[in-house]
Amino acid sequence: MTRPSPFSVRGRHALLVMRDEREISIVRRQLNRLGMTITEHDPVEAPPSDETVDVIVLDADTIPIKSDPATVWKVDAPMIALIGTETPSRLKWLLDLKPASYLIKPLRSAGLYTALVVAFDSAQRRIDEAAYIERLEDRVRSRRVVFAAVLQVMHGHSLSESDAFTLIRRTAMRHRTTIEQLSAEIIAVGGMPNRTTRTA
């Protein structure tokens, strides 16, 4: 499956969480030119739970810090934050939202496409990093299982670590299974499983 290019924004869906009519018109006009579909939402209301969007354009100044929006607005879609108030408390709150990109107010007609590209690219990088970490964690878990199985075979057959691993590897190859799968069986049965027939 090919990943969508961050530069390709046509046909994507944007959720505008804004109140200022001038700023809404600027963003709406630019998104229309880029061929994106738009849904508008009032910042004082809870995020729509039944709508799938590709990006959220959020006016960070319109949401009270004490309303705990850092939890409410933590959604899967990348967020472009519109920032006008640069106080430390507001910026700290904004960092908790983890926006993928931002624009400084007052908004101009330029800059939104760049913010979109950065947001889409950032979101894809987060997905890739999460998948990479998950693969690493799977490998660590698999190594623990294999190591436990090697210890089991060492004690059960009075073998060295190297010989125990070789036995597991050869048995796995003979029965056309993975070392990890065979290791899980070894741990489950407390020793080398009794495999009398080969797997087809």
Image (cartoon, helix red, strand yellow):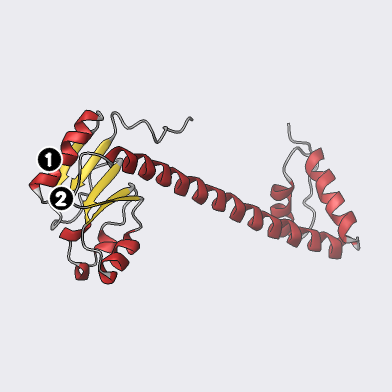
- Give the total of numbered labels: 2
Residue, far left: 21
In the rendered structure, the answer to whether residue 42 lies left or right of residue 88 reads left
Residue drawn at x 13%, y 44% as measured from the top left: 24
Residue drawn at x 34%, y 62% as measured from the top left: 95
Q: Estimate the x, y position of residue 168 in percent, counting from the top left.
A: 81, 50
Q: Estimate the x, y position of residue 8 in percent, counting from the top left.
A: 36, 30
Residue marked by disc 2: 18
Q: CA distance from mark 2 to mark 1?
A: 10 Å
The front one of 74 and 169 is 74
Up the image or down, 189 lies above or below 25; here it is: below
Q: Which amino acid is tagged 2?
A: Met
Residue drawn at x 25%, y 60% as measured from the top left: 72
Which is closer to the viewer, label 2 or label 1?
A: 1
Q: Estimate the x, y position of residue 87 in percent, counting from the top left.
A: 25, 68
In the rendered structure, the answer to whether residue 65 lies left or right of residue 161 reads left
Local SS, label 2: loop
In the rendered structure, the answer to whether residue 42 lies left or right of residue 181 reads left
Q: Which amino acid is tagged 1?
A: Ser
Residue marked by disc 1: 25
**Quarter of the image where the C terminus is located:** top right
Residue drawn at x 27%, y 71% as measured from the top left: 89
Local SS, label 1: helix
